[in-house]
Image (cartoon, rainbow, N blue to C red):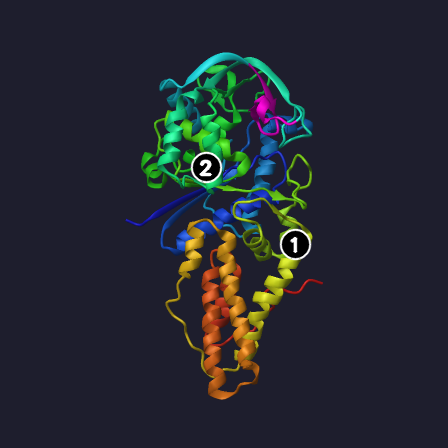
Amino acid sequence: MKDRFYITTTLPYVNAEPHVGFALEIVRADVLARYHKLLGEEVFFNTGTDEHGQKIYQKAVEEGKEPQKYVDEYAAKFDRLKKALNLSYNNFIRTTDEHHVRAAQEFWKIVDANGYIDKKNYKIKYCVGCELEKQESELDGGKCPLHPTKELEIIEEENYFFKFSAFEDRLLELYEKRPDFVVPANRLKEVKNFVRGGLQDFSISRLKEKMPWGVPVPGDETQVMYVWFDALVNYISAIGWPENKEEFEKWWPGVQIAGKDNLRQQAAMWQAMLMAAGLDPSKQILIDGFITAGNGVKMSKSLGNVVSPFDYVNRYGTEALRYFLLAKISAFEDSDFTKERFEEAYTSDLANGLGNLVARVVAMAEKMDAHIQFLGLELDKDVAKKLERFEFDKAIELIWDKIREVDKLINEKEVWKLEGKQKEEILVTLIGRIRQIAVDLQSFLPETAAEISGRFGGEKIVKGEALFPRLS
């Protein structure tokens, strides 16, 4: 039976334009999807949009639009990332899709039938930015540290609650049995500490008369589902749950990629919900750090300092943005994204590095009488090991080490001065190494990898345009 790999991003909330923080998440997922395809595995790659909740409803009202029209417009903007970033996802789920709505309602019914939903009155401090209840210990000066410009709302009403408190021991057991369940290890430690601190039951519905934009609660027309309860179900509704059990079991469990501000929801809330429904937990959860806007300042929609991936693709190209996100943003820690850092990496690593190397070898080899075919090249094992550990930046560093080594060999041998058989022999070596670099780049920079292979893989060496034109 063919091995299978299921990977999913979180679903971005469609209350603003796509930004580079989500581009980082989905490009990393794309690299893993492409890598597993190279291994010969069957891959299901899911992404989409989260379209219910109070923030969406408020934004739609502000713009004078029906919520469905509003989310339709924004979902289309996020789906445009597929072309802009050259993504290979084969499923784009929207939480307003009829199938997802039915799946969320069925999930509710099962969790309720299993005894994990209660109805009661409550009063909380609520951050609309996070769409989450906030405890006093989570606040900084009475404000949510992730959304300091937003006032907390006081919500007091009768809602349905999920018995999160019933899953403390089972979650801790899961984390102990699977030490790589959350990557990196410091994030697993964080979620363990959160669970050990005691879990509180949380509200999973809202009064429809106050906030009508949500999935209707089964059997209660006065309530709609809390956005997190509905949205998280996408990970299983995307692969056929509940009606297509064969398809679901073919893919589940899968790997999830999320930002560190999603740690509690993905690694604790969602896993408890799965347990409550009698389903297996996720396979693994990769947690990214934040992209910062310089000097460690968090980049966020609420602070208004986000970067548009479309702007960078239009100016520098898809492959350049993919390279920076994968090579210059730490796999697990916060990293700055600035125009200055971006252009420095573009010039040194792409234009003067890989692009210049390819141009040099093409110029020296295009008059060779015979071209040597290089067969059976496979992904470098050390690069593969880094990818298995989700160390995207370190994997690319290994590839760029090879680029520097080839450049060094050219200079040491002074290849441009050689003639005849001696020159041809060293060029064959150089071309072989560049072909290997192209193979190693397939998951990271697929267009560049294909272009390099095309230039050196046919009957003749092809000069072509500069891979990465110098910045003007």
Sequence-first tag of 2 and 1:
2
* Residue ranking furthest to the bottom: 420
**Relative to the observer, which residue lies in front, 9 or 125?**
125
* Mark 2–mark 1 CB contact (< 8 Å): no
Identify which amino acid the numbered label 2 is placed on: Leu
315 in relation to 273, above or below: below
**121 relative to 379 in the view: left or right:** right
Identify which amino acid the numbered label 1 is placed on: Arg
Measured as percent of width and height from the top left, residue 31 is found at: 48, 51
Q: Quadrant of the C terminus?
A: bottom right
**217 relative to 66 in the view: left or right:** left
Residue to which mark 2 is pinned? 188
> At 35% across and 47% down in the image, what residue appears?
4
> At 65% across and 54% down in the image, what residue appears?
341
User: How far apart are the alpha carbons under marks 2 and 1?
Assistant: 30 Å
Measured as percent of width and height from the top left, residue 457 is found at: 46, 71
Q: Which residues are magenta?
A: 123-140
451 in relation to 21, above or below: below
Residue to which mark 1 is pinned? 341
Question: Dot 1: within a 10 Å radius of its alpha carbon, few (fewer than 14), some, or many (20 or more) residues?
Answer: few
**Quadrant position of residue 351:** bottom right
Q: Specify whether residue 418 is in view.
A: yes
Measured as percent of width and height from the top left, residue 434 is found at: 49, 69
Circle 2 — which element? helix
